[in-house]
Amino acid sequence: MRDYASTAIRNVAVVGHGGSGKTSLVDALAFVAGSSKRHGRVREGTALTDYSPDETERGYSINLALAYAEWEGVKINLVDTPGYLDFAGDAMAGVYAADASLIVLGATAGVEVGTEKVWQYTQECGHPAIFYLSMMDKEHADFEKVYQAIRERLTPKAIPVEFPIGEGPQFRGIVNLITRRAHVYKHGTKTGEYDERAVPPEQAAQYERYERDLIETVASTDDALLERYLEGEGGEIAHDELVRAMRAALRRGELYPVLCGASELTYGTRALLGEIVELVPSPAEGGPVEAERWGSAERMLVAPDDEAGFSALVFKTISEPHVGDVSLFRIRSGSVRNGREVYNPARGAVEKLNHLCISQGKEKIEVPILHAGDMGVVAKLRETHTNDTLATQAAPVVLPRVPFPEPVMHVAIEAKVRGEEDKISTGLAKLHEEDPTFQWEYNSDVRQTWVRGLGERHLEVILGRLARKFGVHATQTKPKIPYRETIKGRGEGQGKHKKQTGGRGQFGDCWIRMAPLPRGAGYVFEDQVVGGAVPSKFIPAVDRGIQEAAARGVLSGCPMVDFKVELFDGSYHTVDSSEMSFKLAGILAFRNVAPECKPVLLEPLTDVEILTPEEYLGAVMGDLSSRRGQILGSEPDGRVVRLKAVVPEAELYKYATQLHSLTHGRGTYRAKFKGYAEVPPEVAAKVIEEHKREAKQEEG
């Protein structure tokens, strides 16, 4: 492996909908370039960047993976990303780590949900993008149809720089509008070799139309070229001038080239490698990134320059068998040598970069140095995790973090074998380090372990990894809802604990009043005892007893909240009274009085914000209404409608799956806890009955 300076590096995130051909394309690019010695196949489990057991078993990408292709003296870092929305965190990490996006679309399926999502990520980053229509050799492939869909659904600035000669089984070459030549592929060759010819007569009309569109589009981005074109000299624009203008326009987001090919046949790969080298900006051209000095509000710029202080962002952590944690990082400034010590400001840790490597799929190639803008991998960092910055102690900067999407689905899990709860916790914590879009917690209110992710498929993969890597087999169950209880009326009564067992007895006696408080006020205890009816040293024990009883409620076993207790009278025995006696008296007082104060059940409410195409708005609103949701309003937001509602948490179990079905995968939502509200009587009756049934089963 030769040494590549920043100017000779291209960082490209290969993104698109699941099944569009991203992994096959990465494999073909590395193979045709000679950087990989084997041409693998996804369906055979041999693709370069689909090498984890999860991926070979399922036949699709789950993890972000790195590969590279060396072409015309340039190293192209290829960030292969998963396409299914359940693994959108890795797709986002790939886009944020790269300098450009290669958006792959199937020539039969065209623009899909995942295509729209990665286009959104690319736009948020302000990155250049190239569209690549893969699988041109498949039945029903249609270049023009997909091209028009890109212009209508993504951007009108898309413009072909290639178009196919034949489609489907008749696909045999491409016409390159920049070189103005046809590439007719040699049947049976494995590395994308072709004969270069004049444009075939049957493609002449199509060529003239696409070339005119390309020249007009490029000329409109460059004043000098536009003047020449308007003077009738557009056809005379030289190759170098055209490329230079396209490169500049691509960086400014004024055009997006459209290319095509067939990865399994390696057709179109050589032209694509050439276009990436010619059109995609190097890290040196990308400009500085704004960072923050750790421990202060000072903002500073870090430049993609070897002479600057070192800084790099860890954008992915992978746990590999027999290796441990492997950190994937992008250098934003400075260079780094093998064995160098670096500093993690957020953790206050010094890390040593032993065995500094680059990645070709699962193969790791050790290198002596990596320059500004490059991507590398290193194993066994002790304290560093995904989204951490590595820098120097002299300049402890923190780079912008990848804004990973928040989980939208949660389920409860439990170990199949008793006694493995600690192993579950250890495994889940490790899996969260690998994948920040996966979260977990133990909810003490309902005594369940909850796991959160981006969808059912995501959580299935997580539980599969838990079993394979940590030997813990867990089953999914429906999460219990953390209901609360409160009171709507007032009441007073006595709690008296008296026990005589032959020796010293137990005696505690208290009188209390209970009253409701506003929602969210919590619990208030007031001492209004006069005349020493209850000695002051025993009053805190009464308070503790009431709180202990309130934690179990009176209706459903759930905590009671938002009420006030006044201790106003009682009695004691000089010998038999004790703190424990008065604590038990407090418990009895609560149990006697609370049922008389009109107790009701409260449920957690969730603020829900949904983004959906307008054509599905009615179906989404109808579904929310059926879930006891309160619609707050909707407003246009670009190409979609933003809908806001308040929905009981109990009605949102696996809602992500339902929304996906209602909107054909194009709807997304975010949920945030809002507060508690009274449960309708008919729903409360079912919850209370279920609690009684579970209590009987536990007793039995």
Image: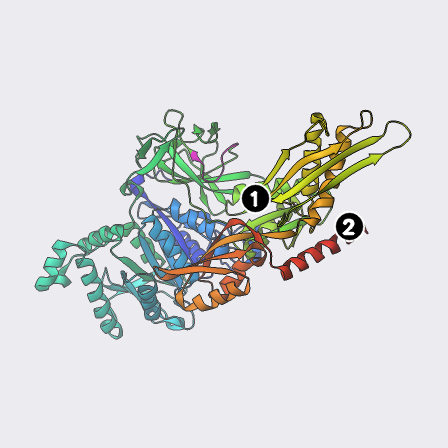
The image shows residue 662 at horizontal and vertical percentages of 49, 66
The image shows residue 230 at horizontal and vertical percentages of 10, 62
Q: How many labels sit on residues?
A: 2
Relative to 1, residue 167 above or below: below
Other-residue count near label 2 (Cα within 10 Å), few / some / many at <14 / 14–19 / ≥20:
few
Q: How far is disc 2 from disc 1 in space, using C-alphas?
A: 33 Å
Contact (CB < 8 A) between labels 2 and 1?
Answer: no
Other-residue count near label 1 (Cα within 10 Å), few / some / many at <14 / 14–19 / ≥20:
many
Q: Which residues are magenta?
A: 382-389
Amino acid type indicated by mark 2: Glu
Q: Quadrant of residue 207?
A: bottom left
Q: Quadrant of residue 499?
A: top right
For image coordinates 10% across by 58% down, the residue present is 227
Using the rendered image of the protein, determine whether residue 21 is visible from the camera's viewpoint. Answer: no
For image coordinates 51% across by 57% down, the residue present is 60
Residue that badge 1 annotates:
431
Residue 54 falls within the magenta-colored stretch: no
Relative to 277, residue 589 above or below: above
Residue that badge 2 annotates:
698
Using the rendered image of the protein, determine whether residue 9 is visible from the camera's viewpoint. Answer: yes
Amino acid type indicated by mark 1: Leu
Image quarter where the N terminus lies is top left
The image shows residue 384 at horizontal and vertical percentages of 49, 34
